[in-house]
Image (cartoon, helix red, strand yellow):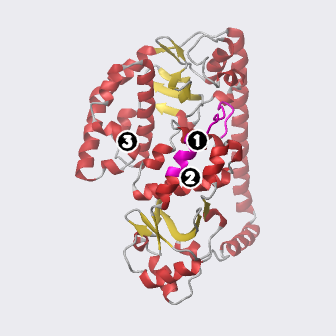
Amino acid sequence: MSQDIVSIELGLPQGDLVTLWAPRWREDGEEWEAFLGHEDDLYAFPDAAHLAAFVRTVDEHDLTDHPAWDVVPELSVPELLPDDAHTYDLVGVPELAADEPDTWTIGELADIIAIVRSLADVCELDEVHEVLNSAAGFAVLEQGTFPFTGREGERLWTDLAETIVERWDEVLDAIDEVVYVPEVDKATLDQTTDELAAYQAESEEAENALDSEDAEDVDTEDTEESEKDADAVADEEVEEEPAGFWGEVGIDPIKIITTEAEYYTLRCYLDDEPIFFGTDGRIMVTKSPRALARYIAQHGTADNDLAEVSTWDEVRTKATDGSLEVEVETDNTYVLNGLADDIGDGTDAVDPVQLDLATELLRDTADWAQDKSVEQALAQSEPLGWFVNFVLNPSPTRLAPSPPFDAEKDAWSRLVESFESRLEVK
């Protein structure tokens, strides 16, 4: 489970306030989640300088027992600034609901509703749960746009939007009521304010320097046409370097190494959505590049999801005339063999690159097959998800998962077994 403590910004009626959130973690066999606060109060601050001054001087609050808390008072003010992924504009939710339910709108709304649910759970805000349970759309936001397509989806979105228009003020009022802005030590605040000002000045200076460089580049292009032309020719020569057949058609040959064998298949992305050589969640694979080319030549017109890609006919034509060469790049080689044992041995035994590629393959396949099991198993609130996230995204406020790692190993093995069951060897 995640043992992070992260800074978040909440856009509330009283303003944009900064606080700390500890996503779910497990300790002594129990699962916990917490925000910076005490008893019935949720502590929040006007900026990171006030937050830093508080955490450096006050030790009576609900996060002091968190396993990673000792690291937090040592963090600099810039390290306590919330990033874009942890900025939640609760006041802007009605405006979001007025938009069309596209990927960006639903993604942002899903993030906000998730943090609101956490606030309602931790602060025991029954009125917030009542609102979120009054429209079915709130529960399926994390599934993306799919639940909101078609006539039923339109009705689902309309019901969600109407509920937000009618009742979102209840949510804001309930959260606003528990928010408390504590006073902080003045001397420490002076110090942290200076830290924040220095960081902002450095950031502004760097941004101005970048703007100046851009302006100089424009001037150089305008006044030195001959050099610009020469550079353009050079750039054109670089661009004209052959991208290779697979790069031109936008389809990637991939190699999958399991405990049983090496398999070859194809995958591409359309609008960032993965599509595999197969259909109905089954991936057609072969045990050699030549066998894959031969199978495409013989069965390239058969039903498969890649046949919907505009460049598929080019692949099939090359396979038919015998000129198709299946060459796999390093980034498209996925080694599943041995990872379960490595996970069982702990975080230090796992190759982050191998794990990153393997999780990419499992996620892509599950997304293509509309299977939520991988997303659920790799959620940071799950043992395996916490383990994977720790290996791929180490953080100073994150404790290393502790042994034994049997649960993580078993969960990973189940995901791999499920993936391998999708492979249809040709």
- Residue 190 location in percent, x, y? 71, 14
Residue at point 46% right, 56% down?
A: 418
Q: Is residue 396 magenta?
A: yes
- Relative to 360, say whether 312 is above or below: below
- Of tags 2 and 3, which is closer to the observer? 2
Q: Secondary structure at mark 1?
A: helix
Q: Pointer 1 and pointer 2: residues touching (CB < 8 Å)?
A: no
Amino acid type, callout 3: Leu
Amino acid type, callout 1: Asp
Amino acid type, callout 2: Thr
Check residue 359 in the rendering and tell me which mark sits there, or answer none.
Answer: 2
Please report whichever mark, 2 or 3, sits nearer to the chain's N-terminal start: 3
In this rendered view, identify the residue nearer to me: 314 or 364. 364
Q: Is residue 147 left or right of residue 43?
A: left
Tell me which corner region of the image, top left, top right, bottom left or bottom right, holds residue 125: top left
Residue hosting label 1: 406
Q: Is residue 186 left or right of residue 309?
A: right
Residue hosting label 3: 141
- Residue 43 location in percent, x, y? 53, 16
Q: Is residue 417 left or right of residue 345?
A: left
- Relative to 109, say whether 308 is above or below: below
- Residue 283 location in percent, x, y? 45, 67
In this rendered view, identify the residue nearer to me: 99 or 344. 344
Tell me which corner region of the image, top left, top right, bottom left or bottom right, holds residue 260: bottom right
Find the magenta span and give its range: 394-414
Spatial CA distance of label 1 from label 2 is 18 Å
